[in-house]
Image (tube, rainbow, N blue to C red):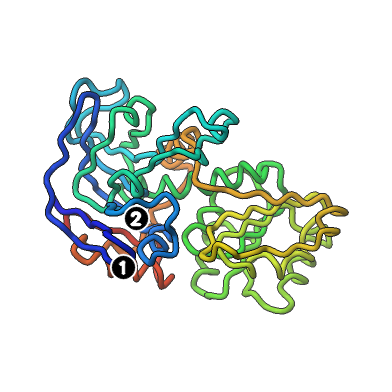
Amino acid sequence: MKQAVLHAPLDLKVEDNDIPTLESGDVLLRVESALVCGTDVRIYEGRKKRNVSYPTVMGHEFSATVADSAGPLPAELSLGDLVCVYPLLPCGECVACTRDHPNICRNRIAFGYQLPGGFSQLVRVPAAAVRAGNVVPVGGISPGAAAIVEPLACAYNGQRLASARDAQTMLVSGCGPLGLMHIRLAKQLGVQRIVAVDPIPERRVTAEASGADLTLAPGDDTARQVLDWTGGAGIDVLVMAVGRTDALHPYLSALAPGARVSVFAGFSGEGTALEIPANDIHYNEWTVVGASSCRLDDFREVAAMVRSGALQVDDLVGTQVPIDDVVDAIELAASGRDMRVGVAPWA
């Protein structure tokens, strides 16, 4: 079977390796769609090394069909089912897990990091992940839509932590695929009015089609326009959907009293700092929350939304590149010129 194996930063080779041997309780999946996350780009370039083991098969956003199992399948699964895969296996014992933050488990292992991920024709799911419910059936939707459940669940985690359900207004800063996911989720969660900011005109058009009530290009007067649009009340939730400090700093004056800021996107530099005047936080009672990956219950809830048609996501899946050209896929994803770029294992 073909796998794209990362041996070191910038050293990614497509190899012909043996089909995984299954142990009791394991499941073998035939990968149908694997998407390239911004995190994959940073792993490939060597800008992200935390939790990454070499050699590794990247790809934590993927869908597959159930091809084989070593023993009986769980009741909800059958051979041939289309599934999406929750990528994390938390330890269940560390301080994060015992405080109900399993997605930031200090000892977690994950597909695409320590476990071979979706940039492969076949993937073995260990019995522990099968028992935990990481393999989620999603019949009736496209493989691309199934693969996009994972980043969508990450967006859902960020909105839950920022109490988006209680927001009247939201600003989504950055309208790449994840920004668009945030807009669609926010509408689904009942946010009444959403403003989206992005410098690329085509992305603003897609943001409007995704449900944004106002779209703006970043500029010297953007914060004023946002504040005027709210009648002076300000924005309840700001989502940083791109890992840049200017996704937040220009809009501080547009935040409402009691506003929440979701630092959703990852940043390339370990020393990158967000600077917010302390008295602004103090007197306005602002809350700043991080958001890393997602929990299994988030993942399953979002999978149900996509499966039911409540969330339309097929148009967020962009060019699918044959696995032999996986580096081209990563470079296209890094360019920001497309939607969620994918690796097609069987093309």
User: Residue 57: image x %, image y %?
Assistant: 27, 52
* x 64%, y 53%: residue: 262
Residue denoted by label 1: 10
Q: Which mark is residue 254?
A: none
Q: Amino acid at mark 2?
A: Leu
Q: Amino acid at mark 1?
A: Leu
User: Element type at marker 1?
Assistant: loop
In the picture provided, is 131 more to the left or to the right than 1? right
* x 64%, y 74%: residue: 218
Q: Nearer the viewer, residue 67 or 14?
A: 14
Using a 10 Å C-alpha cutoff, classify the residue at mark 2 as few (fewer than 14 neighbours), some (14 to 19) or many (20 or more).
Answer: many
* x 42%, y 57%: residue: 49
- Of the 4 image quadrants, the one containing the C terminus is bottom left
* x 52%, y 32%: residue: 94
Q: Farthest residue in the right direction?
A: 283
Q: CA distance from mark 2 to mark 1?
A: 18 Å
In the picture provided, is 229 more to the left or to the right than 171? right
User: Element type at marker 2?
Assistant: strand
Q: Is residue 242 visible?
A: no
Residue denoted by label 2: 35
Q: Is residue 297 visible?
A: yes
User: Residue 146: image x %, image y %?
Assistant: 35, 45
* Comes first in the chain, label 2 or label 1: 1
